[in-house]
Image (cartoon, grey):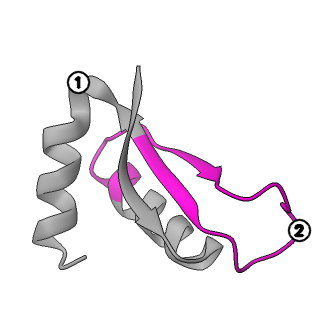
């Protein structure tokens, strides 16, 4: 099951978070909150598998997010 570990305020931030977690070997999915997928100002959920939540949180905190 996928679990939200971060709420990003833009696609740029979400993509940066995805690259950060992926570089640490963590699987990542991004999911826009709004129905308007063309708008770059959407909020995005950053999701990881349930088994990797603790590791993802550690990486996010370590990198200062």
Residue found at x 31% / y 42% = 25
Q: Residues within 10 Å of mark 1 (few under 14, many from 20)?
A: few
Classify residue 52 by image quadrant: top left
Side (left or right) of 42 relative to 16: right
User: In the drawing, does residue 25 fall left or right of residue 64?
Assistant: right
Q: Where is mark 2, residue-wise?
A: 38
Label annotation for residue 51: 1
User: CA gap, disc 2 to disc 1?
Assistant: 32 Å
Q: Which span of residues is magenta-colored?
A: 21-47
Residue 40 picture location, percent across and down: 75, 77
Please check the rendered image and state whether residue 37 is part of the magenta-colored stretch, yes or no. yes
Looking at the picture, does residue 49 appear above or below residue 20?
A: above
- Residue at coordinates 89% horizontally, 68% vertically from top-left? 38
Q: Residue at x 18, y 53 (%)?
A: 57
Figure check: 50 above or below 56: above
Is 65 on the left-hand or right-hand side of 33? left
**Horizontal and vertical percent for residue 30?**
58, 50
Q: Quadrant of residue 44?
A: bottom right
Percent coordinates x, y for residue 63 in the rendering: 19, 74
Residue in the image at 48% along x and 69% along y: 8
As helix, strand or loop, the secondary structure at mark 2 comes to loop
Give whichever of discs 2 and 1 has the lower sequence position: 2
Q: Does residue 26 belong to the magenta stretch?
A: yes
């Amino acid at each position: 099951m996928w679990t939200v570990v971060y709420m990003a305020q833009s696609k740029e931030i979400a993509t940066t978070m995805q690259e950060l977690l992926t570089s640490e070997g963590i699987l990542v999915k991004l999911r826009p909150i709004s129905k308007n997928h063309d708008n770059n100002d959407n909020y995005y959920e950053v999701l990881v598998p349930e088994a990797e939540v603790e590791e993802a949180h550690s990486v996010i905190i370590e990198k200062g997010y």
